[in-house]
Image (tube, rainbow, N blue to C red):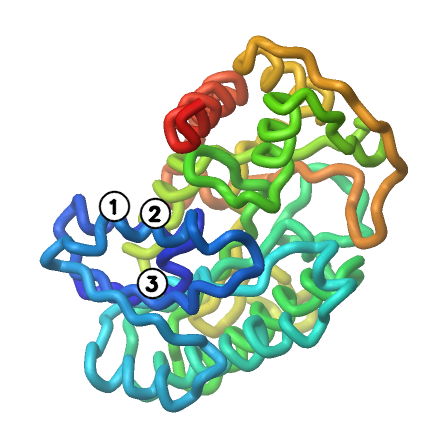
Amino acid sequence: MKVLVTGSAGFIGSALVLQLLDRGDTVVGIDNHNDYYDPTIKEARLRRFAQHPAYTHLRIDLSNQEAIKTCFREHQPQRVVNLAAQAGVRYSIENPLAYVESNIVGFTHVLEGCRHHHVEHLVYASTSSVYGANTAMPFSIHQNVDHPLSFYAATKKANELMAHTYSHLYQLPTTGLRFFTVYGPWGRPDMALFKFTKAILAGEPIQVFNYGKHRRDFTYIDDLVEGIIRVLDCPASSNSHWNGSQPDPGTSKAPWRVYNIGNNNPVELMHYITALENALGRQAKMELLPLQPGDVPDTYADVQDLVEQFNYQPSTPIEDGIANFVAWYRDYFKI
């Protein structure tokens, strides 16, 4: 297939591109290489496949309507994976307009490109943050998610709703994947694992929010990418049993679906830190802090629908995933 991947120099996007190229797909990548975090790592990720004969890279922004129109017209992708977004819960409190430009305006341009060029399937990144104030665990796609706690989460919930209208109006198959705390080699420098590793190796204290009582459904990058590809290969279909008097939030009469994609095994933050200490061979100094605005205490993915429909079985233990990250970190930074 010819697949368009947005955010192709990002953590998840670059890992996905490598897997698609390895299996023989042609890939067009879009990334704006912004400086939300150090763009040096984006360039390094890109170098792993930039010269591949089946890869084309476009340095454009999703908010640039004409550039996105030209991309779809010239490259005619059969399927699209939208991973480009302004990420980060806490940054959305400081700079909400960045999220409007990328996550709302940019996503609309992607939807329009898919609509006008008859794309077979649009898969896009949502987030576990959409569950917001929900406390019933594990989080299920069949739960209502109308109480987000951050503007970032609100924009991702908006993406799900926007996709539904395009699926309904234009019969565009769309699937949203609610990612649960992705980690692993080539990860984002703004995320906890990267920050913790850097601080521990420097002998500096790490900031542990919610006094370490967080639980997160950490998802290893290879497991996540496998799930994305399985979903990409099966365009969303309508649910013929969907009932408007008792609407199922996870399906529709339109060719629209959402799924959780996580490890289905929440881990306490303190256990996560212990695994990191063991991999580094050093003990962390901790600064225990209260829960941050916009954060949720726990995440736990119910992935039963993904298991039943796609035989998705994440298999990487947290200890192995963290050890792989530490080995990559030491190699990348020559430590």
Q: Please, what secondary structure does the residue beneath circle 3 have?
A: strand
Q: Position of residue 310 (x, y in %)?
A: 37, 43
Q: Position of residue 212 (x, y in %)?
A: 80, 27
Q: What residue sits right under mark 3 in the picture?
A: 5
Residue 237 visible to the viewer: no
N-terminal of the pair, mark 3 or mark 2, is: 3
Spatial CA span between label 3 and label 2: 17 Å
Q: Which mark is residue 48?
A: 1
Q: Which mark is residue 44?
A: 2
Spot the residue most to the left: 53
Which of 126/330 is in front? Answer: 330
Residue 197, picture quadrant: top right
* Residue 169 position (above or below residue 233): below
Residue positioned 68% across, 12% down in the render: 283
Q: Amino acid at mark 3?
A: Val
Q: Quadrant of the C terminus?
A: top left
Label 2: how many residues lie within 10 Å, few (<14), some (14-19) or many (20+)? some
